[in-house]
Amino acid sequence: MRWLCDGWRCRYNQLRSRRTKWDKNLGMSIPLGGKPDMRSDRQVRLECSWFAAIPAMVLQSPNRIENTDWWSANKRRKTLKKKHRNPGMTPRFKKRRDDLYFVCWHNKGANANYRQLNRRHGEVVITGQNPGAYRLDGQRCRYSIHIRVRVSQPIRDYTSVDVNWTRRTLVFVNDPLPIGRERTGAMVGLDRGCVHTLATSDNRFIDLPKDRLNHIDKEIRRRQKAQARRIAMSGETVKQYRRHASRTYERTGREISRLYAKAHRIIDDWQHKTTSMLVREYDLIVLEDLNLQGMSRKAKAKPDPDRPGAFLPNGQSAKRELNRSLRAASLAGIVGKLEYKTRLTGRNRLIFVNPAYTSQTCSKCGHCAKENRESQADFECRQCHARMNADLNAANNILKRGLNHLLGLDEAGHAETEPDAQPAYRGKDASAMTCETSTR
């Protein structure tokens, strides 16, 4: 299977070499890979022996996937630049150390056909043929690859299969099912945070399974310390030691990767279940329009004017733990899942409002003062003396701002939407936007 994955990666990189990037020194666009490879699928089959036996449905898939990946990344970079945020790196080539991976088009039964074996198991059959020039005497022309899979639900109509041979996973790619629901008339404001992942305006806390995640984090740190001890005992730098790392060091690294992946799956599963519950229960969902990238940015260094080359304390030690908590909570993932799920239902509305002073304003009387927020968890209004949890108070303020937007009491504009597209609105002091789909 490695030859098939390597061939797919090679063809993907050949197509990626045609892209260009802007060179500031030369003042012109230059090919991303130095020399672009302009050969067609037929030409590479004839000139490169390792492509000869790759099925056509596999060899054709990098063309569309690379094109979608490239333009999606450029659109994302353009959007981030407009928001004066870090756009990230230009898309690069796939590396040999990446997971062994390939995609095969189904093409209405032309290849990658699924066959059910029993209630929980099935197999995907990928067929191909060996050209005569590369076939041994007596060897059959056609061949088939049978990939056994364990399924958790009935397989719907699909357009392609994505095979990750390193992680032993196979994904059937198809359009998401619409979420069936009836209108409930319920509305909710959501306050996102580190202590409580979600606080709702109807006085509920929805938290990540922190006990499981903390246990995984403890195991990761234990293994990372073991790796650090090995490097310290060798007397070399990390880069030098990794060139000839021991098998134990590499095995520990693989264990750390598996633990990180497990934590990510737990968070992703929780987010899917939580967002599906919110979409089914509420017609209107209001969120803060948070700049999470700015919130998790490192504190700026403070040079000491009296001592050149020295720096004053800037609070980075305290900020480090906050940044780690924000990344662990994966708050941006909640927004992405809510956006596409509200679009699938066609009966929900998702609104983003300005988060300024939602944690300092009393949801009962509207009095805003810094002194109202006694601590992270406690809120007491200095005017009406109402006491409540600070996160629940913020969630109620968020809902009120969303309702003000619907009533036209704020300065936000409505977005022009396409037919059958459910818009997401940005609240006061922010521009409105339309949710757009990106499918492959």
Image: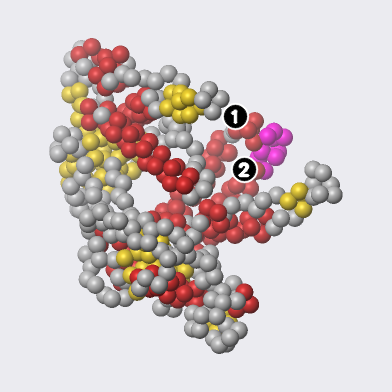
Query: Dot 2: within a 10 Å radius of its alpha carbon, few (fewer than 14), some, or many (20 or more) residues?
Result: some
- Horizontal side of 45 relative to 25 (left or right) equals left
Inspect this view and state whether residue 218 appears.
no
Which dot marks residue 181?
Answer: none
Q: Is residue 278 visible?
A: yes
Question: Tag on residue 227?
Answer: 2
Looking at the rendered structure, the kind of residue marked 2 is: Gln
Residue at 25% from the left image edge and 66% from the top image edge: 347
Q: Dot 1: few (<14), some (14–19), or many (≥20) neighbours within 10 Å?
A: few
Q: Position of residue 133 (x, y in %)?
A: 23, 12
* Furthest-bottom residue in this view: 384
x then y, percent, for residue 274: 37, 65
Which residue does the numbered mark 1 point to in the structure image? 243
Q: Out of 27 and 89, give the one closest to the viewer.
A: 27
Q: Nearer the viewer, residue 108 or 251?
A: 108
User: What's the distance in space between the residues labelled 2 and 1, CA to CA?
Assistant: 14 Å
Q: Quadrant of the C terminus?
A: top left
